[in-house]
């Protein structure tokens, strides 16, 4: 559809990764979404694939990542689930067994809803900024989760990932070859690591979502360039967002810039709407040949863009925890994300301090 004047501004959230979506479908059919009918897209892997994952992962445990001296990422121990005060409003999925998915149909927000999105986006940005200051060699990702959890609840919000489809923590921490959905645990960050911290808060009934990739200590030039180009992909994608812009042009913008620097673009995980629900239409692909011809509207629909770039293979392998997704060849991956508001004048970034 073309943009229509006189409608409420539209919220678009950039999600360098679908963050908390995952699938029990085989990899070739992982993203079998539907653009009409149905209420959500099921995104889970088969147990047969999980066995393959275990085989690949166990093989990688005893090897160094090819062409580097870096050890493969390994799971650590999980701490108990952190409590949230009863006084804090919780999203509906927390007390249900609702399976993860993308809700079909556009959400429409009035001016009050848009202000709520601004508030949740601003808090998410503040939490992310604080979390980034904690990234140092020797710090456990679980310590980052603890700090994020505490800051969110102290501000009267709920950490959206906690309990979503069974996710056990309040933030995603994706280190090195982890593409997305890394679960905070006892692993200590090491000098030279890169880490994506993905923060989503649920404040006054609205989700605010953002992520960034941070450097830990002395990071290689090649890793720094990957992170820089990933951020550039997001910035370039946001810069073209305006009413009437086809969603596929966003994907092409990301893909072309990544391809220019010879980086891979992960296609399994996508951008999508965010607002009163965690994941909603429209789906935004980050590759140049996305099948979705829809246009950005000047409405109050909040979707997000999530470019995820890799140095090598774009094929994902999921660990047996059913969440952590790593690159097939152990190559580094980076991700950035913003929630933005689409207006007739362009895009307003909501998730910045």
Image (spheres, grey):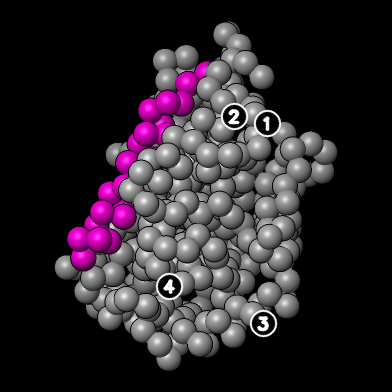
Which residues, given as a range, are shown in magenta? 219-243
Q: Earlier in the sequence, mark 4 or mark 1?
A: 1
Kindly identify which residue carries mark 2: 301
The percent position of residue 259, horizontal first and vertical second, equals: 40, 46
Please rate how many residues cluster around mark 1, counting C-alpha atoms within 10 Å: few if below 14, some from 14 to 19, many from 20.
Answer: some
Which sits in the foreground, 133 or 323?
323
CA gap between label 3 and label 2 equals: 39 Å
Question: 224 left or right of 9?
Answer: left
From this view, report whether residue 261 is shown above or below residue 170.
Answer: above
Mark nearest the camera among 3 and 2 is: 3
Question: 189 left or right of 345?
Answer: left
From this view, report whether residue 207 is shown above or below residue 8.
Answer: below
Mark nearest the camera among 1 and 3 is: 3
Residue shown at 65% from the left, 34% from the top:
292
**SS type, badge 2:** loop
Residue shown at 56% from the left, 51% from the top:
267
CA gap between label 4 and label 1 equals: 37 Å
Q: Quadrant of the C terminus?
A: top left
* Residue 106 circle label: 1
The percent position of residue 211, horizontal first and vertical second, equals: 40, 51
* Residue 51 circle label: 3
CA gap between label 1 and label 3 equals: 37 Å
Cβ–Cβ under 8 Å for marks 1 and 3? no
CA gap between label 4 and label 3 equals: 18 Å
Which sits in the foreground, 272 or 154?
272
CA gap between label 1 and label 2 equals: 6 Å
Kindly identify which residue carries mark 4: 330
Mark nearest the camera among 4 and 1 is: 4
The percent position of residue 77, horizontal first and vertical second, equals: 46, 84
From this view, report whether residue 95 is shown above or below residue 156.
Answer: below
Cβ–Cβ under 8 Å for marks 1 and 2? yes
């Amino acid at each position: 559809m073309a943009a229509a004047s006189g409608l409420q501004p539209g919220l678009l959230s950039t999600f360098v990764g679908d963050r908390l979506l995952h699938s029990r479908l085989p990899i070739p059919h992982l993203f079998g979404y539907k653009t009409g009918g149905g209420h959500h897209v099921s995104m889970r892997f088969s147990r047969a694939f999980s066995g393959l994952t275990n085989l690949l992962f166990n093989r990688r445990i005893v090897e160094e990542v090819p062409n580097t001296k870096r050890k493969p990422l390994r799971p650590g121990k999980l701490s108990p689930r952190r409590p949230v005060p009863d006084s804090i409003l919780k999203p509906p999925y927390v007390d249900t067994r609702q399976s993860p998915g993308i809700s079909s149909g556009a959400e429409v927000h009035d001016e009050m809803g848009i202000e709520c999105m601004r508030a949740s986006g601003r808090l998410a940005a503040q939490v992310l900024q604080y979390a980034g200051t904690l990234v140092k060699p020797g710090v456990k990702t679980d310590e980052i989760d603890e700090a994020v959890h505490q800051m969110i609840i102290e501000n009267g919000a709920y950490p959206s990932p906690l309990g979503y489809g069974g996710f056990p923590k309040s933030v995603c921490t994706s280190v090195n070859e982890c593409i997305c959905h890394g679960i905070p645990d006892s692993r200590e960050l090491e000098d030279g690591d890169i880490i994506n911290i993905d923060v989503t808060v649920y404040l006054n009934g609205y989700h605010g979502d953002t992520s960034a990739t941070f450097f830990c200590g002395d990071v290689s030039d090649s890793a720094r360039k990957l992170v820089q180009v990933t951020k550039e992909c997001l910035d370039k994608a946001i810069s073209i967002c305006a009413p009437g812009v086809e969603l596929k042009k966003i994907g092409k913008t990301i893909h072309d810039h990544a391809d220019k620097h010879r980086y891979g673009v992960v296609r399994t995980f996508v951008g999508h709407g965010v607002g009163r629900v965690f994941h909603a239409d429209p789906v935004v692909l980050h590759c140049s040949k996305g099948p979705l011809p829809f246009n950005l509207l000047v409405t109050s629909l909040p979707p997000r863009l999530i470019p995820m770039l890799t140095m090598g293979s774009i094929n994902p392998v999921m660990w047996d925890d059913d969440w952590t997704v790593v690159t097939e060849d152990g190559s580094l991956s980076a991700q950035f994300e913003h929630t933005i508001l689409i207006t007739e004048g362009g895009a307003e970034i909501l998730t910045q301090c």
